[in-house]
Image (cartoon, grey):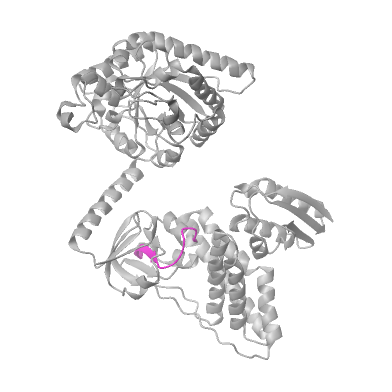
C-alpha cells in the first residue's frame, strides 16, 4: 500500500468534470484499489458520485491511498492529475 | 398583456408562440417479483440502451455546444456505471423482491436527496443530473424511450425545468427560446442555452406555468429576464426594434470578428478599446479589440478609501496584462482632479477645476504617489505588453521631469532585482492645445501620442462640455481641433513615434477617413464600438484623393 497527500487546486473544487476524470482513471486499474481520504472520510475514487458527494473544495488536502497491482504507478498517475488541476 | 420576470441567462429577444414542454411522466409502481436475476438483467439492458442514447446525445452536443459542455453527458454515462448507484439498485431488488423500475426510482430519490442536502449550490444542482439519468433508465425499462418531438413551427419552449439531455435533444432549429419556472444559472440548461445562443429565462415561478397555454403569443427578452404574454402593440414594437438591433450587432460581430482593420487599399491600423476597470476586459475580448488603448487607472483610487498600495495596484495591472495575453495594454497614470474627486487626496475646492490642480500636476508635486504607481506598473510590465501614458501634458519641462522619475523608478527596481519588461513604451496624452502646438518638441522624447479629444475640444474651443446651454458652440468637428490632431500626427511620424486617438471622437465614423488620411495609427474606442469602427475602416479607400 502506498499513499501521497496532495492539494486540490481547481477553483471550483472537485466538481463534475474533475470527479469524472478521476473516477475514469481510477476505474481503469481494476486490480488496484484507489481511496481518497478527505475531511476524515474515505472515498472510493472509482465511484464518481462518492467523489462528488464528498464535496471536496479548492484548497482541501486529500490523501490518496493505492493498494494493489502497480500501486506506485497508479498513485503517481492519480497524484499527477490533482497536481495539474485536472487540466483546468 | 401579462408580464413575468425571471432571470435572463442568454441575452437575445425571441417573438413567437408558446409550446409547453410535455414530458413523458415517469410513474412507477411497486411490484413484487420472484425472478430477481431477470430484474437485474432488465436493469443491465436498460443501462446499455441508456448509454447508447447518451452517446448519441453526447455526439449531438459535441457538434452544437462544444466539448467542454458536452462532457456532462459523458459524466452521465459514468454515473450510470457508478458502483454505489448500481449496488443500491441491486440491493433493493434483492432484499425487497421488487421490480427494477421501483428499485431505480428509490435509488434516484435517495441519491438526489443526498445531493440536494449538500451545503454547496453547485452540488445541490447535481440532484437534477441523478434524476435525469434515472428517469432515462425507467423510461427504457418501460419500453417507451422516445424523446420529445416538436411540430413544424418555431416555438418558445416553456417548462417547469429542463434536464440537460432534454435541452440538447430539442431540435435547435425549432426552438426560439427556453423559459422555465425553476432552475438556476448554475444549471446545465442555462449553460447550454448560452452556448446554443438561444434566449433563455429561468426561475419565473410556479404561477407562470398555470397561467399560460399552448399557442399563446409571447415575447421573451433574455436581456431583462422578462416574458410578455399576449404583448400589446407598443411592447411588440419596442422589442421588435430591440431584436433587430441585437441581431445587427451580432451579425456585425459574426462578419467582422477576426478580420483585419485594413482599408480597401491595404492600409492597416490598430483598433483598441478604452476601459476603466478590470471588469471590462471581458467586453474587450468579446468585441475583438486588438489591445487596450486607454486603461484609466483612476478606478483604483476612486474605489479606495485611502491611497491604493503598490501591491494592490500591481495585482490589478498584472491581471489586466495577463488577461490580454501579450496584446498591447496602455495604462494611463492617475487622472484625478477636475470632475473626478477623491476625498483622501484632500484637494482644495477650486473655482475652475478643469484648469486646476489635476492629473500629472498632482503627480509632479506629490511624487510619492506617482512613484508608487510607477513601481507597480513597471513590476507588472513583466507579465505582458505594457505602455504607460501620462495625462495633461503642457510642456517639455514637465515631460523631462516625468521621464527622469521613470528612469529613477526603473533603476531602483533593477537594483532590487525585480523582473521587468525590456521595453515599456512611454507616451503622452495630447489633450491640451499647448501639447498639440509643441508636439514637434515632445515627439522625440516619447514612443507614442494619444489624443484625448474630449479635453482637447473643451480647451481649444473654450466650451464646457457639461454645460447644456452652450452645446451649440461645442462643434466637435471644429477645424481647429482637426488641425491640431493633424499637426500632432505629422510631428509624431517625423520623430518615429506613433499616434492614436482615445477620445470619443475616435468612434465617430464620419471622421474615420479623415483620421486615416492624417496617418493616425490607432483608434481606441469603447469596446462596443470596436467592430463598428472596423467596418468603417474596411470601407475606406485612400487611393482616391
**Looking at the picture, does residue B265 appear above or below residue B56?**
above
Whole-percent x and y of residue B324? Answer: 48, 35
The image quarter containing residue B398 is top left
Q: For residue B345: magenta?
A: no
**Residue B517 appears in the picture as rendered:** no
The residue positioned 58% from the left and 75% from the top of the image is B109
The residue positioned 47% from the left and 57% from the top of the image is B191
Outermost right residue = A1
The image quarter containing residue B110 is bottom right
The residue positioned 54% from the left and 71% from the top of the image is B131
- Left-right relation of B454 to B29: left
Q: Nearer the viewer, residue B144 or B530?
A: B530
Q: Which of B127 and B370 is in front in this view?
A: B370
The image quarter containing residue B43 is bottom right
**Looking at the picture, does residue A63 appear above or below residue B438?**
below
In the rendered view of the protein, which quadrant contains the N terminus of chain B? bottom left
In the rendered view of the protein, which quadrant contains the C terminus of chain B? top left
Q: Nearer the viewer, residue B343 or B230?
A: B343
Whole-percent x and y of residue A79? Answer: 73, 49
Q: For residue B182: magenta?
A: yes
Whole-percent x and y of residue B239? Answer: 25, 56
**Looking at the picture, does residue B132 appear above or below residue A64?**
below
Instruction: Give the magenta part as a residue range.
Output: B174-187
Amino acid at each position: 500500500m502506498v499513499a501521497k497527500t496532495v492539494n486540490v487546486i481547481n477553483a471550483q473544487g472537485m466538481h463534475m468534470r474533475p470527479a469524472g476524470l478521476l473516477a475514469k482513471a481510477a476505474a481503469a486499474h481494476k486490480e488496484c484499489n484507489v481511496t481518497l481520504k478527505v475531511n476524515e472520510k474515505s472515498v472510493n475514487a472509482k465511484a464518481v458520485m462518492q467523489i462528488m458527494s464528498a464535496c471536496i473544495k479548492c484548497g482541501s488536502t486529500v490523501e490518496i491511498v493505492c493498494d494493489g497491482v502497480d500501486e506506485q504507478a497508479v498513485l503517481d498517475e492519480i497524484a499527477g492529475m490533482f497536481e495539474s488541476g485536472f487540466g483546468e | 398583456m401579462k408580464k413575468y420576470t425571471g432571470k435572463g441567462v442568454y441575452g437575445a429577444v425571441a417573438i413567437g408562440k408558446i409550446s409547453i414542454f410535455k414530458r413523458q411522466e415517469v410513474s412507477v409502481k411497486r411490484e413484487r417479483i420472484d425472478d430477481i436475476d431477470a430484474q437485474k438483467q432488465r436493469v443491465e439492458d436498460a443501462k446499455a440502451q441508456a448509454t447508447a442514447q447518451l452517446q448519441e446525445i453526447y455526439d449531438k452536443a459535441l457538434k452544437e455546444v462544444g466539448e467542454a459542455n458536452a462532457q456532462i453527458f459523458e459524466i452521465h454515462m459514468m454515473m450510470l456505471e457508478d458502483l454505489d448507484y448500481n449496488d443500491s439498485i441491486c440491493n433493493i431488488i434483492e432484499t425487497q423482491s421488487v421490480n427494477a423500475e421501483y428499485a431505480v426510482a428509490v435509488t434516484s430519490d435517495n441519491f438526489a436527496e443526498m445531493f440536494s442536502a449538500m451545503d454547496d449550490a453547485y452540488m445541490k444542482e447535481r440532484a437534477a443530473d441523478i434524476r435525469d439519468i434515472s428517469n432515462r433508465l425507467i423510461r427504457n425499462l418501460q419500453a417507451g424511450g422516445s424523446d420529445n418531438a416538436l411540430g413544424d413551427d418555431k416555438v418558445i419552449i416553456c417548462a417547469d425545468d429542463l434536464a440537460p439531455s432534454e435541452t440538447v435533444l430539442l431540435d435547435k432549429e425549432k426552438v426560439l427560446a427556453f423559459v422555465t419556472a425553476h432552475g438556476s444559472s448554475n444549471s446545465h440548461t442555462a449553460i447550454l442555452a448560452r452556448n446554443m445562443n438561444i434566449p433563455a429565462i429561468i426561475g419565473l415561478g410556479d404561477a407562470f406555468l398555470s397561467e399560460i397555454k399552448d399557442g399563446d403569443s409571447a415575447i421573451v427578452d433574455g436581456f431583462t429576464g422578462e416574458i410578455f404574454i399576449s404583448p400589446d402593440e407598443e411592447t411588440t414594437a419596442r422589442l421588435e426594434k430591440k431584436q433587430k438591433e441585437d441581431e445587427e450587432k451580432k451579425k456585425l460581430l459574426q462578419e467582422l470578428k477576426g478580420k483585419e482593420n485594413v482599408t480597401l487599399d491595404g492600409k492597416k491600423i490598430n483598433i483598441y478599446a478604452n476601459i476603466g476597470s478590470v471588469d471590462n476586459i471581458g467586453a474587450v475580448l468579446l468585441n475583438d479589440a486588438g489591445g487596450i488603448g486607454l486603461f484609466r487607472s483612476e478606478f483604483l483610487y476612486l474605489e479606495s478609501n485611502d491611497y491604493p498600495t503598490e501591491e494592490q495596484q500591481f495585482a490589478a495591472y498584472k491581471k489586466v496584462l495577463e488577461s490580454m495575453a501579450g496584446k498591447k495594454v496602455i495604462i494611463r497614470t492617475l487622472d484625478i482632479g477636475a470632475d473626478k474627486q477623491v476625498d483622501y487626496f484632500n484637494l482644495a475646492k477650486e473655482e475652475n477645476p478643469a484648469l486646476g490642480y489635476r492629473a500629472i500636476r498632482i503627480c509632479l508635486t506629490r511624487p510619492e504617489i506617482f512613484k508608487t504607481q510607477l513601481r507597480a506598473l513597471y513590476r507588472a510590465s513583466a507579465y505582458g505588453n505594457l505602455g504607460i501614458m501620462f495625462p495633461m501634458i503642457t510642456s517639455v519641462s514637465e515631460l523631462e521631469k516625468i521621464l527622469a522619475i521613470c528612469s529613477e523608478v526603473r533603476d531602483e527596481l533593477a537594483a532590487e532585482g525585480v523582473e521587468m519588461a525590456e521595453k515599456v513604451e512611454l507616451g503622452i496624452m495630447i489633450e491640451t492645445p499647448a501639447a498639440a502646438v509643441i508636439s514637434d518638441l515632445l515627439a522625440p522624447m516619447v514612443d507614442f501620442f494619444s489624443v484625448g479629444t474630449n479635453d482637447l475640444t473643451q480647451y481649444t474651443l473654450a466650451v464646457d462640455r457639461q454645460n447644456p446651454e452652450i452645446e451649440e458652440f461645442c462643434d466637435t468637428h471644429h477645424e481647429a481641433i482637426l488641425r491640431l490632431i493633424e499637426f500632432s500626427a505629422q510631428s509624431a511620424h517625423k520623430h518615429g513615434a506613433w499616434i492614436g486617438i482615445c477620445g470619443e471622437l475616435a468612434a465617430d465614423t464620419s471622421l474615420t477617413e479623415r483620421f486615416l488620411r492624417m496617418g493616425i495609427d490607432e483608434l481606441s474606442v469603447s469596446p462596443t464600438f470596436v467592430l463598428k469602427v472596423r467596418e468603417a475602416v474596411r470601407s475606406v479607400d485612400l487611393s482616391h484623393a
